[in-house]
Amino acid sequence: MTTEMEARGQISSEDVSALTTALREGSLESVAQKVQRLFNDNVATTELFVHKLNDKYGEMCTIRPIPYIEDKHNCVEDLFVDSMVFFRLANKSVEGQENWECVGFDNIFESDELNKHKRCVILAPPGYGKSTIFSKLASVWKNCVTDSSMSKFRILILLRLRQMGKIRSIYRAIRLFLLGRDDRFEIVDIQRILGDCSSVLFLFDGYDEYHGRGNNDSDFTRIVKGEMFPNANVIITSRYLPKCLPSKQARVVELHGFGESTRHDYVHKSVALNTELRVEQIFQNLTKNPILDAICEVPLFFCLYTHIAQETKSPTIHSVTSFFKYMIRCFHSHFRNKAQDENVKKLSHKFEFQLTELGKIAIEVLCQANKDEGLMTRGNLTERLGKECYEYYEGLGLFVDQNNVNNSNGDEAIVTFYHQLFCEYYAAHGFVKAATTNPAEMDKILDKLDTLGNQYFYCFICGLNQTLADKVIRHLRGREGWRMLTVLCILERTDNIEDYDNVRQLCSETVEICASETKLLQKAKIKLLEVASYNKIPIKCVMLRHSFENVDGSGQLIQKSGLLLPIVSSLKTITIDATEGRKFTPCEVVSLVTYASQAKAQHLDYATNGRQPDAATKLEEADDHWATR
């Protein structure tokens, strides 16, 4: 009878009144009373379960903008900027990512979308706010915001998968990490509560960092694939698209970094500044160096930069290396000031500058083919650095213990750097030490590295040591496909920002701005062209490969990345290779010709996938031709 009534929708885990009524009408009063008692007990247990989750999320929904200040925690509601990141929603399945829509946070988790797509993945590099978004969602759910899409969920489960270690059971993970091993909840209780609830939302943070990803014996993978809790909503964060994600049911979301307006919103909302002049000083440094500007598109680093730059004694920050140097100096200084123990202060001075072993470890991490294998353990770091040094850097906030609960003594606990770029920074220190001590080590280390994946490592080297910078630039220039990476290195050499020989060498070749490149590299190339133009260094050719979008009102070329290519003089040829199907309108052609003329270019070529609609045009002979097109 129970099965039939449930199938007809007469009873559910939230309401059994129809069943008890039927039992009483069948003269089964005692059975009805027993059913009602069991139901009430289950409801009470579920209420207690939800209450425990609320308490836990109260702890989890805090943000510490600066890792070395442990006593300064902010509620995510206080620091979250509504337009904190840009979202792109795939209107099609995971496999059809062509049509994307840009929306804000308020619209991304609308109930209709959640009903339509039971599985969702949020993609972004480290530091772009994936975990912060989950904290925001948990906070909204905890505070019972009635008009939000979170209000439809009776239960919300937020788990940081990097903490799971070898845990495969979702129920065990909930008991350990969310319920604090509360003796009132056994595994079977959690199974029943989740199984009976018809509105559950799972938030799995850092699926790409979970050791059991892809393994079908893991509950987390089975939930993502829809084999467990197929009717529940599941949202995961990851740096890349997981293979196990069901393409027909999933929605893909990409986070993009801080734009200019979002940066201003964050500064005005979260940082107590004395005057508008101080706000302008914060942004002036970003306009001077494209690499620093690019790194501050990462929300994590812009927040650090903002809070550090507001200090009255902060120096001028003109490069990524100077930013990291000063930032880490602040880490040590604040840690010393906070420590009451004189011994801690002495250790601080010692460990701030003795970086040899830490640099070696960081290089080993970068040289790992699979970065996950490079995740360090507490035991290994303690052995190599010494217990005092490890505990100092952990207290400083540069080492993050991921709280692996599988080992009672904690030696196997996974430890990571606060961010990948800190690893690259210390690896650069290790490289400078190794290469100056034994020059033969330079090529050995560089040959092992993934060049594209560690671009800032090269920048840091050039910012730390001018002599090695020349050698690194020559090394990159000699490697096919990586010559233009030298642009980043040149711009990081702040004492030689107008490094004319290297600029002249790069501009004697075709400077390509490709749609497939990182925004950082595109910015660096544009800066290179500006330096060459200002110093009247000839530019052989600028090629916009699939990156051209339009021409703005001032005559600058808009790239698909949103960057602007200003009018640069001393340019001989500009070539625009558009994507398949791209047609140039008459107005665009006129604008392109105008741009080329103002840049004093001799030739303008435009094509679609390399196929020119017309022959290359020599501008000084083409006035009549273009006027009649």
Image: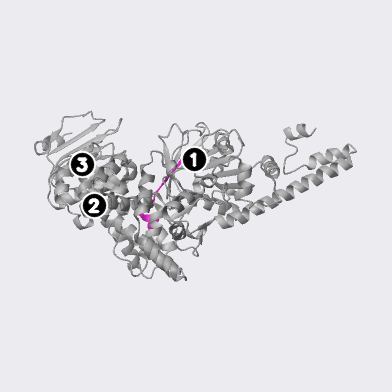
The disc, 1 or 3, on the residue closer to the chain's N-terminal end is 1
Residue 65 found in image quarter:
bottom left
Residue at the disc numbered 1: 121
Between 98 and 404, which is closer to the camera in this rendering? Answer: 404
Q: Is residue 80 left or right of residue 21?
A: left
Q: Is residue 54 left or right of residue 70?
A: right
Instruction: Give x and y (percent) for residue 168.
Output: 58, 39
Instruction: Give x and y (percent) for residue 592.
Output: 20, 41
Instruction: Give x and y (percent) for residue 490.
Output: 22, 50
- Quarter of the image with the N terminus in it: top right
Residue at the disc numbered 2: 491
Is residue 600 on the magenta stretch? no
**In the rendered image, is residue 278 in sight?**
yes
Q: CA distance from mark 2 to mark 3?
A: 15 Å
**Residue occupying the far right of the picture:** 27
Boundaries of the magenta span: 252-263
Between 481 and 625, which is closer to the camera in this rendering? Answer: 481
Badge 2 local density, few (<14 within 10 Å), some, or many (20+)? many
Residue type for callout 2 = Leu
Q: Secondary structure at mark 2?
A: helix
Is residue 256 on the magenta stretch? yes
The disc, 1 or 2, on the residue closer to the chain's N-terminal end is 1
Residue at point 21% right, 47% down? 471
Q: CA distance from mark 1 to mark 2?
A: 36 Å
Residue at the disc numbered 3: 477
Residue at point 47% right, 60% down? 395
